[in-house]
Image (cartoon, rainbow, N blue to C red):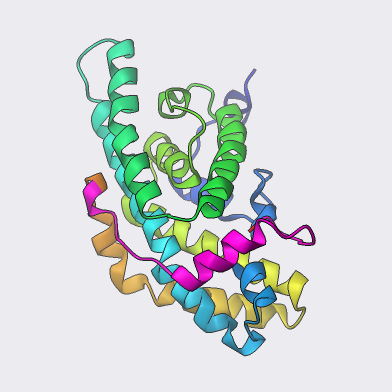
Amino acid sequence: MSCSEAIGPWDAYTVGLLLADARLPSGGHVSSSGLEPALLAGLDRREVADFMRDRAATAATVDAGAAVVVRRLLLEAATDPGTAADRAERRAGSVRPLVQAWAARTPGAAARQISYELGRGLHRLCHTLWPEAETLTDLELPAPRPVVLGAIAAHTGLSAAELARLVIYDDAASAAAALLKLDPGDPAEAMSMAMDACASLEHRIADLAALTDPTQIPYASAPLSEGWTERHALNPRRLFRA
């Protein structure tokens, strides 16, 4: 009996809670959402809240947009009247341009690599939870994390807005959790920073949720932070991968 058969039907809201849980055994604990590279480069703790808001408006927004478009593309492919093989090819073909568009908006090789590693861990876990999910089975692997999240959303019924919020929250929460290891302080303060970062993007959720094409994914970069992450990949003394 598979895990999904043993547990029973999954509600989309429960799936959202699962994916947002920092205890999810998918490898997310290896990422600080760029915070460790920033702190090692001289970012002051008093600047962390601003860093998290900037991160939400750049890297997290790109990932959120990519995940939303993947969800849309895979849902459209599911309506293909052809055979299962036809639908699988349409799914794969529709996602390829999305991956290219995401990579063009994620210029740092180190940032792309950690996303692929996080995507691999998440896909492995969720393919076990939902072995029947064609959206996961038919993904061309390896796939970056936002692509895997979009595929999960398409299978489980997460709405586009819920997915966008999830991606932004996950990025901010990872930074908050990392802060408590890198520069310990009041956990409530760290989570307040994460919630503030999420709130700063709430006005963009509707626009992100409405994206339908890879060309519509936001262009938003933080060159200084990206440079820190690239240098961090060469640092032999680090707690997080990125």
Q: Relative to 165, is 78 on the left or the right? A: left
Q: Please provide percent x and percent y for residue 216.
A: 23, 53
20 or 176, which lies in front?
176
Tell me the magenta residue range.
215-241
Q: As displayed, is residue 199 above or below residue 45? A: above
33 or 132, which lies in front?
33
Please name the residue shown 58% across and 37% down the image.
120
Q: Relative to 217, is 224 on the left or the right? A: right
Q: How many marks?
A: 0
Please name the residue shown 28% across and 41% down the image.
72
Q: Please provide percent x and percent y for residue 3.
A: 63, 27
Quarter of the C terminus within the rendering: bottom right
Q: Residue furthest right?
A: 237
> Could you tell me if residue 33 is visible in this image?
no
Q: In the image, is residue 226 part of the stretch drawn in magenta? A: yes
> Could you tell me if residue 142 is visible in this image?
yes
Q: Please provide percent x and percent y for residue 107.
A: 43, 55
Q: Residue furthest left?
A: 81
Please name the residue shown 28% across and 54% down the image.
217
Quarter of the N terminus within the rendering: top right
Residue 100: name its quadrant: top left
Q: In the image, is residue 86 part of the stretch drawn in magenta? A: no
Q: As displayed, is residue 189 above or below residue 5? A: below
Q: As displayed, is residue 103 above or below residue 121? A: below
Q: Please provide percent x and percent y for residue 135.
A: 41, 28
